Image: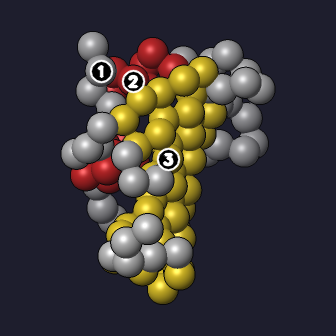
Amino acid sequence: MSSRLRKVEHIEVFDMEGEMVADPFSYTYQKAYYYGNKKLSESKHTSVPRKGKMGPTQLEQLRKIVDKMLTGAFCWTDNEENSNWLDVTVRGGSTIIYKGNDKEKFLQKVMGVK
């Protein structure tokens, strides 16, 4: 394996009703940088806004992150635990996991799949 710097991103999107999810398309985002197999740094954040800070909506922000991730090849499969959930694998090791009730809406609104 060649030693090169690479970025691996993981997004977990929640679109269910209940106490766990406050807004539609809430998400957690993790980004890590690797040099070969060695992890150099890692950062994590959620879509919950910080106090006193206004910004773009969760859906707009999620769409922006996903658009940057999907510049290369990707594929999606149904999750084995629940048929409404979706696992998306992006070339380079990045992943998007959708846990919700309407995967078709997620594919259209967030990933831009018709």
What is the distance, in whole Å, between disc 3 and disc 2 at their CAs? 14 Å
Q: Which residue: 37% across, 46% down?
A: 91
Q: Nearer the viewer, mark 3 or mark 2?
A: 3
Amino acid on which disc 3 is placed: Thr
Tag shown at residue 107:
2
Q: 84 or 71: which is nearer to us? A: 71
Quadrant position of the C terminus in the picture: top left
Estimate the spatial distance between the alpha carbons at disc 3 and disc 1, rounded to whole Å.
17 Å
Q: Residues within 10 Å of mark 2 (few under 14, many from 20)?
A: some
User: Is 94 above or below relative to 101?
Assistant: below
Scheme of colours in the image: secondary structure
Image side of residue 14 versus residue 58, left or right: right
| Spot occupied by residue 113 in the image (x, y as percentages of width and height) | 29, 21
Query: Mark 3 — residue?
Result: 95
What type is the residue that disc 1 sits on? Val
Image check: 106 left or right of 4?
Answer: right
The residue to which callout 1 is attached is: 113
The amino acid sitting under disc 2 is Leu
Q: Check the image and name the residue furthest to the bottom.
A: 40
Q: Closer to the N terminus: mark 3 or mark 1?
A: 3
Q: Quadrant of the N terminus?
A: bottom left
* Nearest to N terminus: mark 3 or mark 2: 3
Residue at 39% over, 24% down: 107
- Can the viewer see residue 91? yes
Rendering quarter of residue 75:
top left
Residue 65 x %, y %? 32, 52
